[in-house]
Image (cartoon, coloured by chain):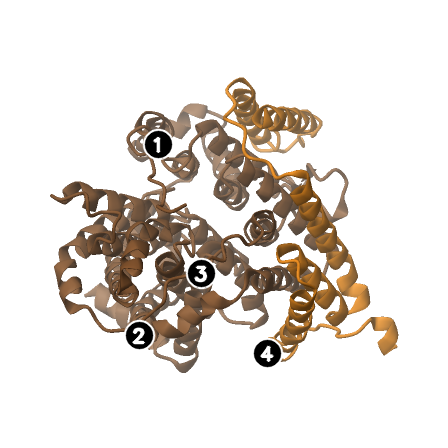
Chain colours: A orange, B brown
Amino acid sequence: MSDRIFGSILTILALTFFVSATQLESPFFADPLGPKNFPFIVSGAALICSITMIIKPDKDPLWPDVKTLIKLFTALVVLILYAFSLKTFGFLLPTALASAALSYLIQPSIFKSSATGLILSLSLFTIFKFGLGLSLFPFPKFLLG
Amino acid sequence: MELFQNLALGFGIALTLTTLSLAIIGCILGTIIGALPGLGPSNGVAILIPLAFTLELDATQALVLMTSVYYGAMYGGRISSILLNIPGDEPAMMTTLDGYPMAKKGRAGDALVLSGVSSFVGAFLATIGLMLLAPILARVAFYFGPAEYFALYLLAFCTLGGIGAENQAKSAIAVCLGLGISMIGVDNSTGMTRFTGGNLHLYDGVDFLVAIVGLFAVTEIFVFIESRGKDSAIGVKLGKISIPIKDILATKWTMLRATIVGFTAGVLPGAGASLGSFLAYMSEKSLAKEKKTFGTGDIRGVAAPEAGNNAAAGGALVPMLTLGVPGSGTTAVLLALLMTLNITPGPLLFNERPEVVWGLIATLLIANFVLLILNVPLVKVFTKILQVPASFLLPGVAMVSFVGIYSLSGSYFDLLLMIGFGVLGFTLRKLKIPAVPVILGILLGGHMEVSLRRAMVLSNGDWTYLFNSYISVGLWIAAFIGFVAPIFLRSYLKKPTPTGK
């Protein structure tokens, strides 16, 4: 079933790709193949493969249970928030929080995960800033003025 | 004679203080990365590449550092296979079969030393093989025109899923995904943008480093959270380390045979180190008169896969350097490194930038001795690394990947894209769709399209031009066989599962 769902998504994707390739206008002076034909070939191949996936699906993989799915989703949210906060909040605080959160998701121990966050944030900052010379701001920019 | 001149040039570069220390650092880092479960050569090298750029190394130095990490990880992968029965990386899977039983019998030290020595034999001889074979292949590649290159890329894609994959349609769909992603951005021959959906961030296309770090490192985080670090098993105690000379001498032919098998598997496009160790183990087992001892701690079962996977790692560098077509996941990552450094691998590399190629080869010859020292007398130090808990390691990997990519572009869009690739990688892993073809598609898609378009310009749109030379016809046939053969071979090449899992 999983294969059928993913195969269908890919079929739609391949069709979208194909349609958006037809929308490309070949310039007057283009080479014989032009910008369209290679996308056509690839989307055609993708179409064949994704339909094969729908017709001949493999056995379903073991999907994680609801509890694990929530964990995975939390991890995803943590990573996305981390990506947004690096610029505004500096390196130290977001890194400590994000790595503590990830650590907690792997092994739920408050002491261990906060230690992980603290150690990782400080040691990585030292390595990146002074070892590799990356331009990282330790604290939020608005605090530094 | 030319070979000696080239080697002299290479050693001239390798024996400078900077290059040598980079190689040593790379070897140490690599062995650590290899030893850590969940971090292997491909994702280890991937997260280190962005950081290597910040050191502002020149091309040779960057390549030397990363290839040493690669070699080191191949050596180090066996440590957790033997002590914990968990492969440190995928190519070290076969080492668990006999390595762990041998360790359980109280011979952990012997197993580590024996596998360290066979890693050395495999890797060192493969480096010599690389030295001899690469210039020859580079000369052949000189006759390659756009039609031949197009067929060559096709061959790489067709064989990549190859014997390792379980479902050809899934490997092929992975390639298509990669090729599709590679087309996003400005089309170089006409200057028009394609498939960007009007998003300005995508005009430059998807940076392959973002894709690689996402698919390898971020995916690993999700996979680990799903398995909740169950793998942190209590390992075997390691006693005093001595050198089991009797065992080493008894397995010398095993090591040599495994090296040849592994190297060949490495050179063939799309095979790589995992297949190298698998074939080495299986051929050794089929040659043995008494097969029952395999899987219970047979010394040949420890020596063969390690010589095999290290030889394959060296072999995989041959097509990467001479043709620009990587044979494995890690060499694909190394190719990404070269392309980011504005170096196009291929025959021209050997003529125009001999210092890069020969500097690399000479350093690898030296690096193997460094690795032998690290992995035999000093192996105890590295076994301590296995005690690092996953709850510390994985967040660390995540943070390093983020900062690495962030330092390259400074844009949160690339970070989000990287997370997106991580989710994609997790889904692909669940559905047993290989991720390496996606990466190879992203890396080579541009080249493949350019070759096809050049061929069409040369022939004025005549498609038969693609089959115009013996080389290209041969490549087309090989591609076809490479795609179809695994369907029939699959029943013969069932992978045995490691014991105790």
Q: CA distance from mark 1 to mark 4?
A: 46 Å
**Would you name the residue on which mark 4 appears?**
A131
**Would you name the residue on which mark 2 appears?**
B373
In the foreground, A36 or A1: A1
Q: Chain of mark 3?
A: B
| Amino acid type indicated by mark 3 | Ile
In the foreground, B365 or A92: A92
Q: Earlier in the sequence, mark 3 or mark 1?
A: 3
Q: CA distance from mark 4 to mark 2?
A: 26 Å
In the foreground, A4 or B176: A4
Residue at (37, 59) in percent of width and height: B74
Q: Position of residue A99 (x, y in %)?
A: 67, 63
Residue B7's quadrant in the figure? bottom left
**Would you name the residue on which mark 1 appears?**
B482
Q: Position of residue B105 (x, y in %)?
A: 27, 59
The secondary structure type at the circle numbered 4 is helix
Q: Assess whether mark 3 and mark 2 are in contact (beta carbons under 8 angstroms).
A: no
The secondary structure type at the circle numbered 3 is loop
Q: Is residue A4 left or right of residue B374?
A: right
